[in-house]
Image (tube, rainbow, N blue to C red):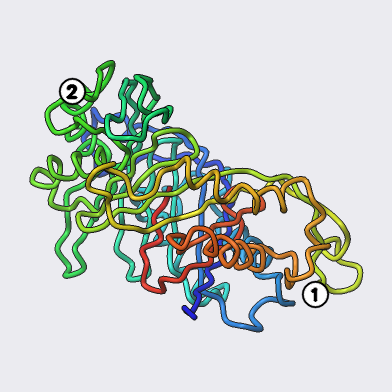
Amino acid sequence: MNSQTTIHSASCGFESACRIPSLPAAHRSHRLHGHSYFATVRAALPAGWAPFPGGEVEELRTRLEKAVAPLDYALLNETLPEPTDENLARWIRHRLESELGVPGIQQVGIQSTGHEGVDLDAEGVAHVWRRYRFQAAHQLPNVPAGHKCGRMHGHGFEVIIHARQGLGDGEAMAVDYDHLDEMWAPFHMMLNYQCLNGIEGLANPTSEIISSWLWERLKPQLPALSWITVYETGSCGANFDGASYRIWKEMTLDSAIQLKRAPEGSPLRGIHGHTYTLRLHLNAPLDAVHGWTVDFGDVKTLFDPIFKAIDHRPLYEIADLPDGDTASLAGWVLAKGRAVLPQIDRVDMYETRGCGSIVSLAASEELIPV
């Protein structure tokens, strides 16, 4: 059986003002301004680190909140001379590791607006990302007869461009949000309010093919490009990193739970509930005819019995579910899901935004932010 890797994730927000002195005086971010920041940490935590098994997410969230507390409702320049998103992420990571005893950190992220942020990977390399949107029509010409995507229809597509700030050898890459905007502008002109099938190279415009089409055209101009993420809808999409495709399908479930291993008197031990966000990740070769790795419709249909078994249910009554923490839930979903969809190799389960667990069969997999 494949070994599993469990990563715990926690997030919290903070409100801060800042200015970036190194930018030109005319640049908007050189002026004093503010953001509603959102910080995230993901860590491979050892057994026994949390006060009780299953309490890892709550403990990680508590320590993250302590890490960012000095930044909340503060002028960031009083703490960091250049409070860029990357520098904030590095400052928070240092606090978590050196002062708050968080081991095994795999990723620290800062999102400064709804469409941009920076993620530090396990090696401390910064990946800048920026989200873009375009409105377009398409149809998939090679789907089976009667498939709804064979009809002409449209989406509000979203694209996230991820680029490395450094290549790991000390070489700095001059990549910032403005640079990504410049790279994206010609593609927005080509794609927005268009029928994608009429664009050269997009005769079969699946999410996977759109992602690789963008990669092939952006990479020569942007050598620091890490990967491309394409959202076809708000709940599904594809990633391409120049070598392999990954897709995901996201859904929410409203379920009751209790943590059996929580100490007496803890509210987590009693019956409570969440609107969970569940994300299935699938890894498969590209089908040369259909232009997809797995049909999103097939994912939904095949996974639906498992979803119905956990949505609007008391999860603590499931006999083979070890406990109610998100790591146990994600591991259970991964096992059940692979029985019907063997392409699933990762499951994310979040009880609140950014707070939850990631169970994966690929220990070295990049923790792609989607």
Q: Amino acid at mark 1?
A: Arg
Location of residue 358 in the rendering, given as x and y in whole percent from the top left corner? 53, 63
Location of residue 315 in the rendering, given as x and y in whole percent from the top left corner? 78, 58
Residue at 33 percent across and 32 percent down: it is 132
Q: Amino acid at mark 2?
A: Met
Location of residue 366 in the rendering, given as x and y in whole percent from the top left corner? 36, 63
Say what secondary structure mark 1 lies in.
Answer: loop
Q: Nearer the viewer, residue 116 or 151?
A: 151
Q: With 18 as the anchor, is 56 left or right in this view?
A: right
Dot 2 corresponds to which residue?
Answer: 190
Is 227 above or below relative to 202? below
Say what secondary structure mark 2 lies in.
Answer: helix
Q: Nearer the viewer, residue 114 or 306?
A: 306
Quarter of the image holding residue 339? Answer: bottom right
Dot 1 corresponds to which residue?
Answer: 261
Location of residue 14 in the rendering, given as x and y in whole percent from the top left corner? 57, 46
Residue at 35 percent across and 28 percent down: it is 133
Residue at 74 percent across and 49 percent down: it is 274
Is 17 above or below relative to 2? above
Is 215 above or below relative to 283? above
Q: Nearer the viewer, residue 5 or 122?
A: 5
Name the N-terminal-most of marks 2 and 1: 2
